[in-house]
Image: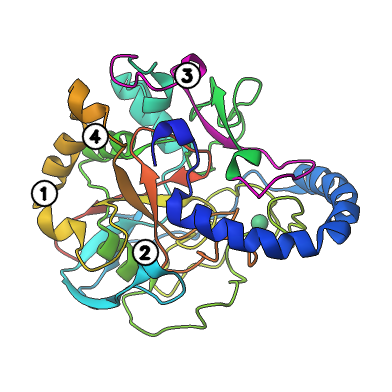
């Protein structure tokens, strides 16, 4: 979806939203009562949330203490809840290392301090490249989730997603917000270009979709109830987007590693922040983009193409995985290893982060 449309959910999700909206309308009266309760409860919960969670010490002899070794195998990629997860197909993978947690604000700040890197959200959009955009959307900024006080119309996602000038990784909620004291939180409001730049600086790469999913499944093809909302993950409890009870401890983003890790010791693969992969998004698994992009460097070069004719075309998207703190049973049941969604390459969003992988011998 083009930047001008400003929703991070993709066309498929928006169509689904209309169906869901019909269900929401049926419970509108109850929701109105809930709204008053929700705003107060959410405000109280936000004050109680932790700013940091303890991460268990890695194995003393680990050659990569901040990463986990994922043994190779044959992944049954995909799921059956939404059409874009089909068909389920087998993908052979070599072993690799992957970050134990999502890249944090502290991690990203070290990269920026060393390189003076400026993220996509911190750059103005060239009007020659995006002539169709209104001037306010050419300003540096990002899309921010803002829970609405009321809902109207047919449930357009623009009621809870706003393009905010001045929003970026240092100010993920826009001007007036910052990340002071939040160094242990995942960095968000970053794009695939930003993720590639960070990974290159670290001597790593952004994971492929298949690598990410294999790691999230714990290097196993054992499947759990696809429709069950996970308990050990930061998701949304209540009626999205108006009422979030925060039963899991957080109404918004959580610091890294606050929930029980998966079988490999990886934290927050599901929920919290969506995670970027290096695969260009296609609306099904019939063709896996990483299989036609031989190297991450070539994928990055493709992302960086900026000629006017190419940039004026609809924005390219990359696959994001794992869902976020905004995933709820009534909207976006993507708190699963097999879920996937497209994210615009030129649009930073306040619920998207990433982690990195390294192809190197195992322990
Ligand atoms: Ca939550």
* Mark closer to the chain start, 3 or 1: 3
Residue highlighted by disc 4: 201
SS for callout 4: helix
Mark 3 burial class by Cα count in 10 Å: few <14, some 14-19, many 20+: few
Point out the frontmost of discs 2 and 3.
3
Residue highlighted by disc 1: 295
Labelled pair 3, 1 in contact (Cβ < 8 Å): no
Q: How far is mark 2 from mark 3, CA to CA?
A: 52 Å
Residue 307, percent from left and from top: 17, 23
Q: Which range is magenta?
A: 127-156
Residue 315, percent from left and from top: 31, 37
Residue at 68% x, 62% y: name it. 22
Labelled pair 1, 2 in contact (Cβ < 8 Å): no
* Mark closer to the chain start, 4 or 2: 2
* Mark closer to the chain start, 4 or 1: 4
Quadrant assignment for the N terminus = top left
Residue highlighted by disc 2: 59
* Mark closer to the chain start, 3 or 4: 3
Q: If the picture is divided into quarters, which one holds ligand 1?
A: bottom right
Quadrant assignment for the C terminus = bottom left
Q: Is residue 202 above or below residue 75?
A: above
The dominant secondary structure in magenta is: loop
Residue highlighted by disc 3: 134
Q: How far is mark 3 from mark 4, CA to CA?
A: 34 Å
* Mark closer to the chain start, 1 or 2: 2
From the Cβ of disc 3, is ligand 1 less than 8 Å away?
no
Mark 1 burial class by Cα count in 10 Å: few <14, some 14-19, many 20+: few
Q: Is residue 331 magenta?
A: no
């Amino acid at each position: 979806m083009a930047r001008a449309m400003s929703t991070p959910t993709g066309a498929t999700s928006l169509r689904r939203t209309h169906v869901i909206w019909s269900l929401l309308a049926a419970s509108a009266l109850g929701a109105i009562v809930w709204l008053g309760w929700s705003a107060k409860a959410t405000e109280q919960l936000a004050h109680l949330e932790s700013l940091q969670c303890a991460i268990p010490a890695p194995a003393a002899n680990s050659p990569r203490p901040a990463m986990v070794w994922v043994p190779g195998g044959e992944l049954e990629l995909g799921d059956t809840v939404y059409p874009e997860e089909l068909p389920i197909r087998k993908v052979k993978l070599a072993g690799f290392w992957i970050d134990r947690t999502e890249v944090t604000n502290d991690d990203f700040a070290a990269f920026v301090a060393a390189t003076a890197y400026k993220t996509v959200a911190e750059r103005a959009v060239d009007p020659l490249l995006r002539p169709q955009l209104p001037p306010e959307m050419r300003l540096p900024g990002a899309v921010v989730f803002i829970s609405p006080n009321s809902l109207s119309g047919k449930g357009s996602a623009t009621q809870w997603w706003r393009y905010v000038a001045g929003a970026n990784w240092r100010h993920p909620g826009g001007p007036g917000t910052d990340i002071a004291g939040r160094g242990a939180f995942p960095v968000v409001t970053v794009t695939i270009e930003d993720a590639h730049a960070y990974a290159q600086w670290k001597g790593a790469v952004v994971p492929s979709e298949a690598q990410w999913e294999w790691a999230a499944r714990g290097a196993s093809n054992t499947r759990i109830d696809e429709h069950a909302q996970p308990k050990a993950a930061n998701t949304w409890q209540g009626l999205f987007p108006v009422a979030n009870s925060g039963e899991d401890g957080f109404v918004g983003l959580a610091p890294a590693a606050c929930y029980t890790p998966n079988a490999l010791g990886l934290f927050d693969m599901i929920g919290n922040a969506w995670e970027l992969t290096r695969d260009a998004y296609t609306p099904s698994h019939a063709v896996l983009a990483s299989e036609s992009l031989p190297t991450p460097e070539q994928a990055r070069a493709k992302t960086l193409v900026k000629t006017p004719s190419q940039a004026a075309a609809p924005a390219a998207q990359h696959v994001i995985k794992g869902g976020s703190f905004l995933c709820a049973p009534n909207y976006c049941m993507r708190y699963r290893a097999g879920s996937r969604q497209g994210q615009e390459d030129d649009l930073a969003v306040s619920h998207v982060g990433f982690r990195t992988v390294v192809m190197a011998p195992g322990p």
